[in-house]
Structures are given as C-alpha cells and as structure tokens.
Amino acid sequence: MLNSEQLSEFTRNSKLETRNSSFYMDEALAEARKAQAAGEVPVGAVLVGPDGEIWGRGYNQPINLADPTAHAEILALREAARQAGNYRLPGTTLYVTIEPCLMCLGAIIHARLQRLVFGAPDPKAGACVSLYQIPADPRLNHRLEVQGGIRE
Ligand SMILES: [Zn+2]
C-alpha cells in the first residue's frame, strides 16, 4: 500500500512519463511531416538516449535517396550510433509514428535498444504486433520493451 506522499510522487512521475512520451512522439510526427512534404510515405522517428536527449532523427526517404533501407528508423539509428561512436545503443528508446517493418525491427534488435514506442499499427508490414510479433519471439536473445498504439 502506498501512503499519500508516495502516491502523489507516483502520480507526478506518471505525468512526467506521459509528458515525455508525448513530447518525443511530437518530435517523431514532425519528422513524418518532412517525409510527407518530400513526397515519401510519412513516417518519422527519433532515438532518445538514457539522458533524455534526442541522439538521432529520421524520416522516411527511400525514393529520394534511392535506398530501400532509408526508413525513418534506420536513419535515426545511424545518426545515433555515429553520435555514440558505437553500433550498440543500450538504454535507448526509439519513438516512431508507425509500427516498424521487419527490416527495422532487425536493426533495432542488432542495436540492442531497450525500448520501442510506436504510434499506429501497420497491418500490411508491421513486425511488432501486426504481421509478425518479432519482439515476443523467445528464441531471440535480446529483450525489447514495446509500447504501441500511442496516438493512433
Ligand atoms: Zn522499416
């Protein structure tokens, strides 16, 4: 049982958590708008470090870069890994506007992200909950926390 002081602290932390997720998802949505303006499928992502800073940003641009791997998530991971000087990014959280595909989930697992937060599910290509449920596969060594359905 929590006493009233613990309860109010818990409530305060919950609000902070909500505000943070909402803040980062807004940043991801701003990236998605860049993709839309560029005539790409509107997907945006930001990679947040354990310090709460945004380490990497990306928006979908496979058409303009003539690169099938240029998804928002991959571009955000690349920028963050360059910043960190490390191909592994433990303790980080990726915020992305749409449920990631198989390729991006693979990269997310290789990079050892701690947490993934996505907006709308993608019934056609989503590899978290829709088409595949990769994070729930017990054969994988790495455990990824997943939170979906944020602002569908
Ligand atoms: Zn992808």
Image (spheres, grey):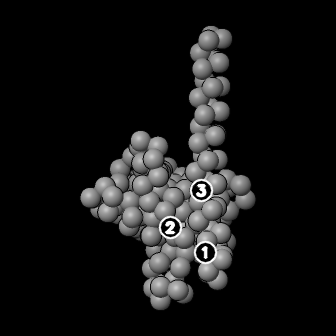
Q: Name the residue type under label 1.
A: Ala
Q: Is residue 46 visible?
A: yes
Q: Which mark is residue 27?
A: 3
Q: Is residue 124 visible?
A: no
Q: Name the residue type under label 2.
A: Gly
Closer to the N terminus: mark 2 or mark 3? 3
Horizontal side of residue 117 vs 113, given as left or right:
right
Q: CA distance from mark 1 to mark 3?
A: 13 Å
| Residue 147 horizontal/vertical position (percent) | 58, 51
> Quick check: is the Cβ at mark 3 less than 8 Å away from ligand 1?
no
Q: Specify the quadrant of the image occupied by residue 40.
A: bottom right
Q: Secondary structure at mark 1?
A: helix
Is residue 42 placed above or below 64 in the rendered structure? above
Q: Name the residue type under label 3.
A: Glu
Among all residues in the image, which is located at the extreme right? 152
Q: Secondary structure at mark 3?
A: helix
Quarter the N terminus occupies? top right
Q: Residue at x 51, y 83 (%)?
A: 62
Task: Give the class, few, some or many, for how many residues have Cα within 10 Å of label 1's Cα (few <14, many ≥20).
Answer: many
Is residue 67 placed above or below 10 in the rendered structure? below
Q: Which mark is residue 58?
A: 2
Closer to the N terminus: mark 1 or mark 2? 1
Q: Residue at x 61, y 75 (%)?
A: 35
| Residue 137 horizontal/vertical position (percent) | 46, 60
From the viewer's side, name the closer residue of 117 and 106: 117
Q: Secondary structure at mark 2?
A: strand
Residue tagged 1: 35
Q: Residue at x 32, y 63 (%)?
A: 82
> Quick check: is the Cβ at mark 1 less than 8 Å away from ligand 1?
no
